[in-house]
Amino acid sequence: MLRESMQTEGKQVDVRGVTQGFDSDPDIPHAAALIDFTEAVVLRDAMRTEAARKTLRAVLGEAGFVDACAVVAAFHGFVRIADAIGIPYTTAARGSDLPELREQAGINEFYRVRGER
Amino acid sequence: MSDTSNTLFAGSDLAVRSDLVEAHERAWAAIAAPGTWLNGEQRVAVAAEIRHARECAQCERIKAALSPNAVPGMHESLGKLGAAQVELVHRVVGDPGRLSEKWSQTVLARGLSEGEYVEIVGLIAMVMMLDTCMRALGLPERALPAPKDGEATRYRPAGARKKAAWLPLVEPEDATEADGPMYPNPKAGYIYRGLSLVPQSLRDYWSLANCHYMPGEFVYQFDKSIRAIRRPQVEIIAARVSALHQCVY
């Protein structure tokens, strides 16, 4: 979905950055602040979240900040449905996440894929 | 961007779009109400266990272990749920990326029905979303609601089949009128079908999730954002959350 949304804007993204960190600016507005905030929330790091929240609210404004929070939260639900129900991952993004994309992104090293090899 | 007015969560001065606040209200009311396989009291007990699981030492040991299914010990539970329910709640909350079909079968073999399993997963997904949203916003978690009286409906869709996933799903073509509305269109993705064994859980979940991410009709419209951030900004958050959870989907 990230790749598709970037392509729509005429841009490319190195999908490895999603699992391994981005070597360079992924050309998404305020990407560093978004990633820092996302990681802080997922890792339940209260101090880091507070600092990242301040930064994100300043750069996105209130409405953008609220929507960023909503998306972080949404995926705490999605991942649990997908992983607990055992939805076939080959159907992700309507099957557009091809094996080579999963390899490139480092997803093939995830537990579930390794377990099925 | 969606055209919605703003309102406030109780105790906050942050302007929040009103559809999001309303979705939270609806979700908590649904959690407290009798479900399909669990009554209101059991559902609120599951919600309490979900919150409790975040502090479980056994979950920490499992998370740190190379082999998550070989860690001796017991989860620290509140004592209101059965052992299989506790295992389901704690593992799905604490280490969802390292679940397996074999593990799901052992949970079911311990006396949980498939319907209960799916209903509990739906509750986990909702409570995690609700609580994470408040924590991200910098607001306190909401107190758990008082359970509502009433009986579970015990409805199982006639078209449910175990085929593509570890648990039975109702494919869009197998949904019946008796199931009630489930899918926005016949091509609804598998993530949408995940809770379909319990149609009410599916409806409750998506009523909440659509307000956090986006309704299905916008998901593949990459040139359009109905939110106050651009689509790549939405997707980089989504991808990073998924990667940190080792979610392949």
Image (spheres, rainbow, N blue to C red):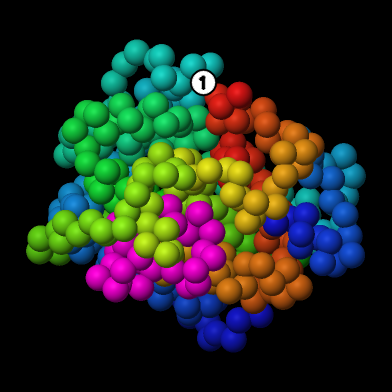
**Residue B93 horizontal side relative to residue B14, left or right:** left
**Range of magenta residues:** B175-203
Q: Quadrant of residue A4?
A: bottom right
Residue B52 is one of the magenta-drawn residues? no
Which residue occupies 70% across, 56% down? Answer: A1
Above or below: residue A15 compared with residue B174: above
Instruction: For residue A60, say whether it is visible.
Output: no
How many numbered marks appear?
1
> Mark 1 sits on what residue?
B64
Chain of the residue displaying label 1: B
Mark 1, Cα crowd under 10 Å, few <14 / some 14-19 / many 20+, is few
Residue B244 to residue B157: above or below: above
Residue B220 at what x, y percent from top left? 66, 67
Q: Quadrant of the C terminus of chain B?
A: top right
Quarter of the image that includes the N terminus of chain B: bottom right
Q: Which residue appears at 68% of the width and 35% of the height? A: A107
What kind of element bears circle 1? Answer: helix
Q: Amino acid at mark 1?
A: Ala
